[in-house]
Structure formats: structure tokens, C-alpha cells
Image (cartoon, grey):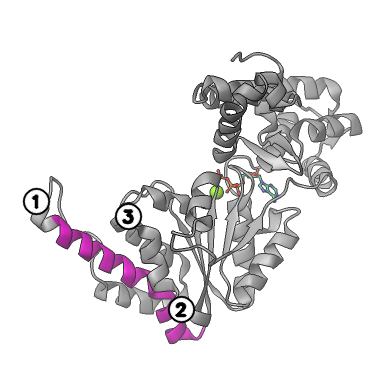
Amino acid sequence: MDNPFQVTKPVAPAEVIDRETESSQLAALAREGNNARLVAPRRYGKTSLLKRAQSDLEQSGWVTIYVDLLGIITLEDFAARIERAYTEALKGPVARWFTGLRRSLRPTLTVGGGPIPASASLEVAGRQREALLTRLALPARVFDKTGQRVHVVFDEFQELDNVEGQADAVVRSEIQHHGDAASYVFAGSHLRMMEMLFADRKRAFYGQTERVSLNPLDPEPLAGYIASRFEQTGKEIAPPALDAVLELVEGHPQRAMAAAHALWAATERTADIDQWETARGALMSGVDDDLKTSWVELNTAERKSLVAVARGEPPYQRIGGRAQGSAVTRALAGLEGRGIITRVEDRWHVVDPLLAEWVRSGRLSP
Ligand SMILES: Nc1ncnc2c1ncn2[C@@H]1O[C@H](COP(=O)(O)OP(=O)(O)OP(=O)(O)O)[C@@H](O)[C@H]1O
Ligand SMILES: [Mg+2]
């Protein structure tokens, strides 16, 4: 029997738990012709939710396009990603129509390898921009052709910040003309960059989107999901073990599935506290390298602040009072910008419960 818990890929739309509100919110914004931005920490279930929302929209007649921008560095990459997304998403007659249309689009590839002379580089930039604009205009063409509205997701949208040529302004200049033909979701996990793109008056998308956020998963549906997966695969999870899982993961979606995955793997028939102890050890050593990497990227002030937040100590007090107030504020802002800590009501909270656990255990020292 295969392990029923998915931990590395987005979950299938039917498997998504506890995101009904967010999914309806995204669909409602689309129907109203509004654009949304979805900002949540890494591994919080953004992509799973987006696929779920798009699958619902498809049921009600929308064409949905999902563009992953992870790793793009040029306008040319951006244009190519969009084109590929249409090739993958379109089906039937509209796919045949698009196959023809593609041929008439200006090619995205405009130069061979090697350095470009300065005189030519402006022209190249202009052509790349043109190529991108024609691909950004595709929703309007699909709508004209089919009468179907188009829902476009740009996932990892913060990556636009690594692209030269004010890519966000290029996007806005085209999509603002789409009216009812298309609605957009811009999703990202890098809080600071997403803020820069959307909350800065000087940037193209200022005031153009409604924010949708993701909370931790509610313990009730989470417990139900984990227990039912054990049952469906001929195993059982005893309440104390289930409780221990919920206690450790604090509703973090990927960590919850990773803990359940480890527990299932450590269980012959019934998962109880003994199995959980084994699973917990395996889980922590599995994330060892990742956590170390996160840790070494922090400076000393950030490490100290993180320890204080993980232990629930007031970080200002811990680091040394008023004189160092601004250094602490900077450290906390740095941690928040990278999505390592977040505000929950009036308190700081470590996003990744395993990192928090790690830090509390004292295995890493500032
Ligand atoms: N609503 C959910 N129901 C069940 N599992 C979920 C849910 N959301 C997230 N997960 C779990 O979290 C993992 C990561 O989900 P997903 O890839 O959608 O997150 P993400 O925020 O897009 O991550 P990344 O920042 O890496 O792009 C999934 O493999 C799954 O284990
Ligand atoms: Mg994702």
C-alpha cells in the first residue's frame, strides 16, 4: 500500500481540505472581474488552492491558465512561460485554433548566444517586450474566439522583480484593457517583494488587487483527513498520536502532511505514541539540512530574535532593551520579509513549526 499523504507536490483539487472560503473568495473576485493577490508563506498550500479554485471555475465554463514564474530572469522567459501555459491548458477546438495562432505570434527567441552589441540590445529589449505583450493579450483573443472568460494565475509572481525592464508595468499596461475577458490572481510567498509590487504607490499594481490570505489549517478537518487516510489504507491512528501530530504542526499544511506521512510510514497497524516517537525522529532528521540552510542565512541579530520568538520570549527584552531597539526591529522585519516569522494578532509567530521546534531544542546556537 502506498503512503496516502502527499508532501512534495500540490495536492489534487479534490484532496484540498479547509480552503472552501478562500476558494469561493477567489471565484467571486473572478466573477466580479476583479484581480486578486494571494500572499502566504512557502509551502502553505497556495498552488493547491489556486488549482482548486481554477478547477471550480472550469466547471462553470471558464478557461483557466496557470503560469508558474519560478526562476524566470528575462522578459523572454516570461513570454515563453505564458505560451507554454496555453499549450498545456487548452483542449479541443480552442487548442487547435491556438496551434495555428501560435505560429503568427512574434517568436520569443530573438537572439542567439553570446554578447549583444549595445546598439542592438535596445532593439532586442523592444522586441522582447513586444513578444511578451502579444502573449499577455491572449486572454482577450480567447474570449473573442470562444466567448469564455479566462482566469489567469501568475504563481511566484515575486520573481518578476528579478526581471529587467519593469516587467510589472508591462503586465499592467496590457491586462488593464481586458475588462470582463479575464481575471487574474498574482500569488507569491516572498512577503517583502509582494509588498513592494502591490503596496508601493510607485509600482504599477498599487491598489489593483484584492488580497486573499491563507490561515493555518483548522485542526478539525485536518484531524478528520489524517484519520480517514489511515483507515482507507488499513491502518488506524490512536487519539494520543493524532493529538501529538496536531500539537507539533500547528496547522501548517505541508508540515501536517509531512508528519502524517512519517507516522504512517512508522506504523504497522495502529499508530500510537511509540510510533509517533519514531516518526518524529525521522521527520526532524528529514528536514535537518533545510533547517540548517535557513539558519546559516540569518545574521546574528536575526538568529537571536528567532530564538526569542520560538521560545515565546519578548524579543526586545531578550536582545537588550531600548538601545538596540532599532537593530531588533530590523532583525524582526528581516525575518518577516523572508517569511520565517509572521504576525498573529499582536504576537510574532514562527511560520514553520519544525524550525521553531528545532530552535527551541537548542540544537542550533546563535
Ligand atoms: N488545503 C490543503 N489540504 C491538504 N494538504 C495541503 C493543503 N494545502 C497544502 N497542503 C500540503 O502542503 C504541501 C504544499 O502545498 P502547495 O505546493 O500547494 O503549497 P505552496 O504554498 O504552493 O508551496 P510553495 O511555496 O513551495 O510553492 C502539499 O504537498 C500538501 O502536503
Ligand atoms: Mg506553490
Question: Does residue 141 belong to the magenta stretch?
Answer: yes
Q: Residue at x 74, y 23 (%)?
A: 311
Q: Is there any visible trace of residue 320 in the rendered image?
A: yes
Q: CA distance from mark 2 to mark 1?
A: 36 Å
Q: Residue at x 25, y 76 (%)?
A: 104
Q: Main secondary structure of the magenta part?
A: helix
**Left or right position of 54 against 163:** right
Number of the label disc, if any, that sits on residue 178? 2
Q: Is the Cβ of the residue at disc 3 closer than 8 Å to that at disc 2?
A: no
Mark with earlier residue (3, 2): 3
Quarter-of-image position of residue 38: bottom right
Quadrant of the rendering where the C terminus is positioned: top right
Quadrant of the rendering where the N terminus is positioned: top right
Span of residues in magenta: 121-148
Choose mark 3 or mark 2, whichever is in front: 2
Image height of 155 relative to 95, above or below: above
Q: CA distance from mark 1 to mark 3?
A: 21 Å
- Mark 2 close to ligand 2, CB under 8 Å: no
Q: Is the Cβ of the residue at disc 1 closer than 8 Å to that at disc 3?
A: no
Amino acid type, mark 3: Asp
The location of residue 317, given as percent across then percent down, is 71, 22
Give the residue at mark 3: 77
The location of residue 316, given as percent across then percent down, is 68, 26
* Extreme-front residue of the structure: 323
Q: Residue at x 32, y 72 (%)?
A: 134
Amino acid type, mark 2: His
Other-residue count near label 1 (Cα within 10 Å), few / some / many at <14 / 14–19 / ≥20:
few
